[in-house]
Image (spheres, rainbow, N blue to C red):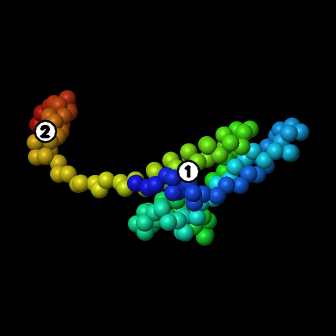
Amino acid sequence: MFDEEAILQELSFKAIRSSGSGGQHVNKVSSKVELTFNLAESLVFNDEQKARLLKKLQNRLTKEGVLILQCGESRSQHKNKELIIKRFLELIKVSLIVPKKRKPTKVPKAVIRKRLKNKRLHADKKTNRKKPNID
């Protein structure tokens, strides 16, 4: 599919301060990790794979074709880096999956006959419930 080692070389990371409440420690430590990946300049993927990724990730990419992911779940910068790499690789794997082409199938004649027979029986049952017409 793709070489994970090579793709990890193309990633760039930046540590930033986490948002939200904290204590005195939160103002000193940059534990949130931001991952950036330039899809347009990537050498790991061929043109077909790049086109698929651009289509699947179009809502997540910047105008320059850069994917930006952030993770601030943990207090540890290293843990956040591991989490963001894992999330990034999963996102790439899911985006590269080629969906199967749907094969249109024909409804068998026996199924059509059975449906029409049941429909006729149900209609007869309803008509038998009516009062007889005496004229």
Residue 30 at x, y percent in the picture: 78, 47
Residue 98 at x, y percent in the picture: 37, 56
Q: Which residue is at a point 46% across and 63% down the rendered structure image?
A: 45
Q: Which residue is mark 1?
A: 88
Residue 87 at x, y percent in the picture: 56, 46
The answer to whether residue 108 is left or right of residue 14 is left
**Vertical placement of 17 versus 51: above or below?**
above
Distance of label 2 from label 1 (alpha carbons): 51 Å
Asked if residue 107 can be seen in this view, the reply is: yes
Asked if residue 127 can be seen in this view, the reply is: no
Which mark lies nearer to you, 2 or 1? 1
Q: In this view of the protein, which residue sits in the foreground, 63 or 131?
A: 63
Q: Residues within 10 Å of mark 2 (few under 14, many from 20)?
A: few
Q: Which residue is mark 2?
A: 114
Q: Are marks 2 and 1 in contact (CB under 8 Å)?
A: no
Residue 12 at x, y percent in the picture: 64, 58
The quadrant holding residue 111 is top left
Q: Which residue is at a point 83% across and 38% down the rendered structure image?
A: 22
Disc 1, SS: helix
Identify the image quadrant of the N terminus.
Answer: bottom left
Mark 1: amino acid: Phe
Disc 2, SS: helix
